[in-house]
Image: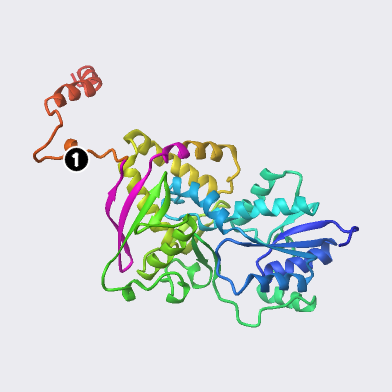
Amino acid sequence: MSEQRDRVVLAYSGGLDTSVCIKWMQEERGLDVIAVVGDVGQEHDGLEKIHDKALRTGAIECRVVDMREEFAKEYLTPALAANALYENKYPLVSALSRPLIAKHLVEIAHEFDAKYVAHGCTGKGNDQVRFEASIMMLDPSLEIIAPVREWDLKTRPQEMDWAAAHGVEVPATKKSPYSIDDNLWGRAIECGVLEDPWNEPPADIYTMTTDPEKAPDTPTVVEISFKDGVPCAIDGKEMSYLDIILEMNKISGANGFGRLDMVENRLVGVKSRECYEAPGALAIIKAHKALEDICLERDVLHYKLHVEHEWADQVYNGKWYAPLKAGLDAFLATTQVNVTGTVRLSFYKGACTVTGSKSDYSLYTKELATYDEGDTFDHKSAKGFINIYSLFGKVWAEKHRG
């Protein structure tokens, strides 16, 4: 390993952009590059192939890190506690993986005594903010390089020409017109014909979900059990949270559930049309919400809705390691104690419906709720309650409506 050159740790995917980043930082910045490949559950042809390509391209080292278990336990668990949906729709697929990858970039930078950390994000997207804000909050002394924002390669053909001229492997097949990012929690699709919000999403963008019209003709019923807010079993079979996510991706996706088509508001001020597949995430969140409905006290449940919205904004905007987000996590953790029980979901041709919920900690009391025999609610006490509850309005009305 060269001792004369400064080192940079690069978030590496194996694609054209980050492959060019390796050679560009070597030649334009005179840096030794350590590539880091994070497995967060994305589709790939083999991480060892990506590892070997990084070394062939010129990286002095390439680390392949299996982050899936950590992703589920440390990142998707608090996301579920928050029922995290940005703009009440998007389950934060990409936003959840970036702080985890950034954490490993910083740790590996410390290991190699690297001065710089780099990524391959463009100047228009949210991910540049998520990576850089996370890195700054984890170690403000590290300097950040974003080659795609700096170089003069404006188009993909220009990039490919530069790569060929500098000995960087270029794709052998035509690139998909879509930009894809995926992990355990789902799949984000943009670009191509999707850039016009009037265009209907083509069928070929979807890989995790079946066309609802082609989904099974009979409902699929699944029971998800939770322990303190975390999924722990499917149909009575105990499983890790990671395995439950993987299984629910299969079940939900096979029934055509989990597609989103939305125009969202990016942090950088641009409205962007995005399509998502998040079959497992959306089903698990739906079940989790249903269990909270019977387990959480009314004021907690109502207040939590505001916290959930703020939590999703914080994470979408790259503030995973920010003080406010940590405080929100602490509150949310207290709400999950005794969110324990089972929820039944029914999937049918693109729909997911809660058809039952039960818990030993349920606050639903049939004797108080029923209008049938066995009603224990004191109806006579309602008059006094209404008088006291409405007193402020009565006094106000006497003075202002007289």
Q: Residue at x 56, y 76 (%)?
A: 176
Quarter containing the C terminus = top left
Q: Nearer the viewer, residue 169 or 253?
A: 253
Horizontal and vertical percent position of residue 113:
81, 51
What residue does disc 1 label? 366
What residue do we see at 76% from left, 70% from top? 55
Q: Position of residue 275 (x, y in %)?
A: 46, 64
Left or right position of 148 against 238: right
Q: Is residue 260 visible?
A: no
Colour pattern: rainbow
For the point 44% across and 66% down, the residue is 197
Magenta-colored stretch includes residue 356 = yes
Q: Which sits in the foreground, 295 or 82?
A: 295
Where is residue 232? Give x, y as percent.
Answer: 42, 53
Left or right: 94 in relation to 396: right
Q: Amino acid at mark 1?
A: Lys
Q: How many marks?
A: 1
Q: Which residues are magenta?
A: 332-360
Q: Is residue 257 visible?
A: yes
Residue 103 vs 191, above or below: the answer is: above
| Residue at (63% x, 55% y) in the render | 101
Q: Would you identify the image quadrant in which residue 385 lies?
A: top left
The secondary element bearing badge 1 is classed as helix
Which x, y percent locates residue 19? 71, 70
In the image, residue 373 lies in the stretch drawn in magenta: no
- Quick check: 70 left or right of 62? left
Q: Is residue 217 above or below residue 241?
A: below
